[in-house]
Amino acid sequence: MNWPCIRINLDSHVSRLDLLGKDAIKLEDGKQITKFVEGILPGQFKILLLLFSMSMMLEDQMLCLSSKEFWKLRGKLTLLDQNRVLRPTQTLGFLQLQIQLEWAIQQGLYHGTQQINQGQMDRWHILSTLNYLTPEHESKLVLGKLKGFNSAKRKLILSNMIKLCNLTRQGFINGDISNLMSPRTLLTWAENFIIFKDIHESFKLSFLNKCDDLEKPIVAEYFQRCFAEELEVENS
């Protein structure tokens, strides 16, 4: 769409003062003076902008961004320190990437995050869910990055690898295992397979060694379902 865009990572050291503005000491005519400096939001309210924010934010940031008036359609942003009311342009848009899920927080996958603020979520007009890639897209991802899987035999192996990845994800959802294979783990497994030429050893080095000893037999069963081969499990 070629919109002017600024990305704000709220999981970094961005505070409420950085978003709205704060008094800062500046040097003018050889003298130190205190002057209000606008933050990120006031300056961007004047132009066409798409704000990209993260959900791993601090309470201080959530208080700022959860303001009812702020998220309303054609809402206003009030700067009490400056006695100003900012009115955004008609085309100002906000896009938030909500990467923390309730079950993920409960499982302890994202440390240091806040619980989902339902009051803030209610301000969004369109909500979309982005799950893992389909097997077809995951296959294209690996084939696009690793040329060593272009043969028919290797493509069949890759298909079974993706099936195993999906089994670990479903097992995680069901509570059978506490670890799962992400697309990045799949890529690592594929790279190690090219290096070691051994599907068993590469799988152990890429994923199995991350698993708890009590869960390794379950993962080995997933492996047997996909490759029709027994996976030797060694407890640490």
Image (cartoon, rainbow, N blue to C red):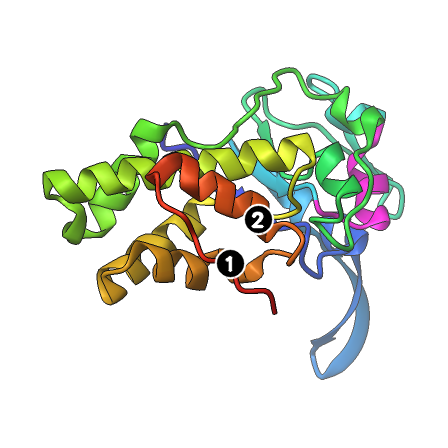
Q: Nearer the viewer, residue 214 or 59?
A: 214
Quarter of the figure with residue 68: top right
Residue 7 makes an appearance in the image: no
Q: For the N terminus, give its image quadrant.
A: top left
Q: Which residue is mark 1?
A: 233
Above or below — where is 228 with respect to 69?
below
Q: Is residue 60 magenta?
A: yes
**Residue in the foreground of this view, choosing between 220 and 64:** 220
- Report how far apart the C-alphas of labels 1 and 2 lie in the structure: 7 Å
Q: Which residue is mark 2?
A: 217
**Foreground residue among 180 and 86:** 180
Specify the segment rendered in magenta.
56-67
Residue 50 placement (x, y as % from top left): 53, 34
Give the amino acid at mark 1: Val
* Spot occupied by residue 17 in the image (x, y as percentages of width and height): 79, 55
Q: Disc 1, disc 2: CB below 8 Å? A: yes
Residue flagged by tag 2: what amino acid is it? Pro
- Percent coordinates x, y for residue 90 in the rendering: 58, 20
Is residue 39 in the magenta section? no
